[in-house]
Image: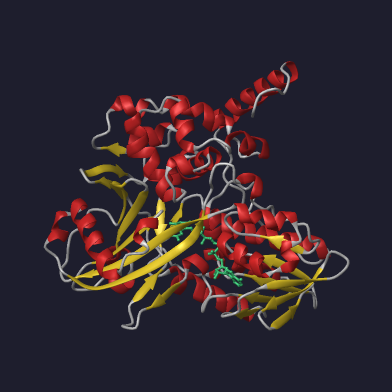
Amino acid sequence: MSQGKRVVVVGAGWAGLGATNHLAKQGYHVTLLEAGSYPGGLVAGWKTAAGRSVEAGIHGFWYPYRNIFSLINELGISPFTTWTRSSQYSPAGLEVESPIFQELPQLPTPLGTFLYTQFKRLPLIDRLSALPLLYAVIDFDNSDEAWRRYDFVTARELFKDFGVSARLYHESFEPMLLVGLFAPGEQCSAAAAIGMLYYFILAHQPDFDVVWCRGTVGEKIFRPWVKRIEKCGAQVLANHRVTDLIVDGNNQVTGVVCNDEVFDADAVIFAVGITGMKKILSSSPSLQSRDDFRNVSNLGAIDVLATRLWFDRKIHIKRPSNACFGFDATTGWTFFDLNTLHDEYRNEPGTVVEADFYHANQFLSLENEEIIPIVQRYLANCVPEFWEAKVIDSSVIRLPQAVSHFAPGSYRYMLPAKTSFKNVFMSGDWIVNRHGSWSQEKAYVTGLEAANLVISYFAEGTPAKIIPVEVDETHIQLARVVNRTARQIGKSILPEFWLP
Ligand SMILES: Cc1cc2nc3c(=O)[nH]c(=O)nc-3n(C[C@H](O)[C@H](O)[C@H](O)COP(=O)(O)OP(=O)(O)OC[C@H]3O[C@@H](n4cnc5c(N)ncnc54)[C@H](O)[C@@H]3O)c2cc1C
């Protein structure tokens, strides 16, 4: 156990809490500084003045989130619904229904996804046009080399080059990019697109199965978790915005500046998003002197809008979670039946719906009074009973520049966990690592990885056990070996003349 080593963690989302939790358990003296009023980051939840629960968008927990599920077991809490089915809508109506894949006979990937997903309109010929894309799925193995090969290409170019039909792209792949990477295909890196689709959908048949929290993630997970973290001795300080670092002549950080307060540190872990990091950079001469941190200025983030509407009557919504496309050219959105998902709203006399919009740039400047009728109109397009219903309460949360943008060419500027300072480590869902997970699970895993780097830096404590993603299925492994061998042979014969 480490006695007395002071670690300052900056940012209390999944990454920061994950790092703090493990280091506190190892006996480190950890201070977690959070700019917001409560821990949780993008997943925080809070109550409105009227006492109703709201949050910065609903968050799903997919089948491969093995490390988060293991943490939940360790905490001894049961925050989740059972596995839920979901639907997809366009302005034309219901487009797709997904089963619970783990309940159906297991087929070699991607057959189960292909055969069991119920497409209501998309012709078979369009679905078959995805087959050549399997080569890219095999070729992209999440290695540094593969990222450099695919990151300069846009997802749209990739799908086009592999012969995906226009209809399959517009009605299936682009909607998935809008809800998975929060941006339209022409603004997503092809590397991120294949990595994300493989992790959430293609690697194993059950991967697309999802559970939701039975309330806000803040209330159901973070509150008990933060209590446990504080019990282990860590200090969690909200309303503490970090502005700079203090560096000695030996390339080591010795303190973390929060406006006019300084927290002494033997090591620092950053666990803030891209926008948060850019803000710290703008006020920090110590970070501005470093190439790696200055390059973060080349990265961007995406606007999101989270709305919650209370209606005066009960409306039957077929599935609790729904993704929608085709309403705005470059915005995806999802809606959730909270009477089914959240304990708090189960016995509500009316309907409570969460509708979240991704890449919502054009909505953020509208007044709430303008946004709510748009949301109601969109909902009514999917479930006509919403036309007649009256909105009796609503919440609109604007999240400008909130989620990481995996733009084409951005990989080279994303930071790895180790930085140019000996004792400063990075974590968060935009940090380069090789685990293969995405979103909340990735943020949590990078938090554990940063904690492990601190442990190895001081050679004190036991590293956190990180559960790897499930291994590739045998036929995928074989195809990858063959492909890698062919690439190596090609490399040994041909000069490195062309762009990767
Ligand atoms: C609407 C929406 C829906 C989403 N849906 C899903 C989903 O269904 N499933 C899923 O897995 N993921 C989803 N995500 C993505 C998920 O929220 C993120 O991947 C994850 O929460 C990132 O965690 P993090 O710890 O890396 O960063 P964050 O959660 O961004 O935490 C960073 C923290 O750092 C703090 N901070 C910033 N600057 C400073 C500073 N100077 N000093 C101190 N603190 C600072 C911030 O206040 C914040 O609390 C969604 C995101 C949004 C917005």
| In this picture, residue 78 sits left or right of residue 323 | right
User: Which residue is most to the top?
Assistant: 493
Q: Position of residue 431 (x, y in %)?
A: 63, 54
Q: Residue at x 79, y 64 (%)?
A: 423
Taking the spot 70% from the left edge, 72% from the top edge, the residue there is: 244
Q: Nearer the viewer, residue 168 or 206?
A: 168
Q: Which of the two residues, 90 or 196, is positioned nearer the viewer here?
A: 90
- Residue shown at 80% from the left, 77% from the top: 3
Q: Using the image, determine if residue 1 lies above or below residue 432.
A: below
- Residue 468 in sight from this viewpoint: yes
Disc count in the image? 0
**Residue 27 can be seen, yes or no:** no
- Please indicate whether residue 15 sits to the left or right of residue 315 in the image: right
Looking at the picture, how far across and down is residue 417, in whole percent?
A: 70, 55
| The N terminus: image quadrant | bottom right
Residue 193 place in picture, x, y as percent: 50, 41
Closer-to-camera residue (17/308): 308
Give the left or right position of residue 386, taking residue 8 as reference. Answer: left
Quadrant placement of the C terminus:
top right
- Name above or below for residue 399 compared with residue 100: below
Residue, far right: 250
Name the image quarter holding residue 28. Answer: bottom right
**x, y (%) of residue 220?**
44, 71
